[in-house]
Image (tube, rainbow, N blue to C red):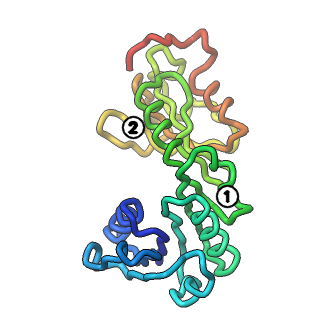
Amino acid sequence: MRIAIAGAGNVGRSIARELIENGHEVMLIDRQSRMVKPDRIPQAQWVLADACELISLEDAGLAGYDVMVAATGDDKVNLVVSLLAKTEFAVGRTVARVNRAENEWLFTDQWGVDVAVSKPRVMAALVEEAVTVGELVRLMTFRRGQASLVEITLPVGAPYVGEPVRSLPLPRDAALVAILRGARVLAPGTDDSLEAGDELIFVCTADVEDRVQEAVLGTPATIDPEAPE
């Protein structure tokens, strides 16, 4: 897959390294010459250009890329880059970094954003995920389909502890995609038993999140909020 990244700072370079290690072709774009240092990631293509300028993106050949990642530290730039990539170059997938929480509402498909990654929200979600047992925690939202990645840690006393995965009465538009059990990542099979302390990872639409929590945890009266993991 060919992936363009606008912003060659710490975030952009970190993303580029991970993608290259996973076998993808990466182009890094930055308008500041001091940031363009090909020796840092020699496997990437480096472009000194303003990613907010249409002619710069044309010269960089953005039309031939599958994904645009807007990873700069400026929310306005990330919105413009996403919009140009989607509307002018028909890039199939756009991922935009949200730097300031108050700007998150702007990062929608109207601005060409398929997936918005909010640093404040991700940090808050990670904190919640680390300390919350017996409640649904939203980890990330996928803008294109209005679906979210959510997590529920099963407390002692949850109604389906000890029961097989197939017994979960999940609503439509919700799927259990992984079980984190200690250091293990399990692909859930229908006959796998659920255990107290399991972190259940779901993809679901926003309108069924409450129903997912109710299906997994039952009524509040059945959950011991002080129960350890």
- Between 74 and 21, which is closer to the camera in this rendering? 74
Give percent across and percent down for residue 213: 61, 28
Q: Residue 160, relative to residue 92: is it above or below?
A: above
Residue 176 visible from this viewpoint: no
The residue to which callout 2 is attached is: 180
The residue to which callout 1 is attached is: 144
The C terminus: image quadrant: top left
What residue is at 31 percent from the left and 68 percent from the top?
21
Q: Secondary structure at mark 1?
A: loop
What residue is at 51 percent from the left and 31 percent from the top?
152
Give percent across and percent down for residue 174: 63, 42
> Residue 187 occupies which quadrant of the picture?
top left
Give percent across and percent down for residue 86: 66, 73
Tag nearer the camera, 1 or 2: 1
Give the side of residue 114 with respect to residue 23, left or right: right
Residues at marks 1 and 2, CA–CA distance in whole angstroms: 26 Å
Q: Residue 90, relative to residue 79: is it above or below?
A: below
Q: Amino acid at mark 1?
A: Arg
Label 1, residues with CA under 10 Å away: few <14, some 14-19, many ≥20: some
> Residue 170 occupies which quadrant of the picture?
top right
In primary-sequence order, the first of circles 1 and 2 is: 1
Q: Residue 181, relative to residue 158: is it above or below?
A: below
Number of numbered discs: 2
Q: Amino acid at mark 2?
A: Leu
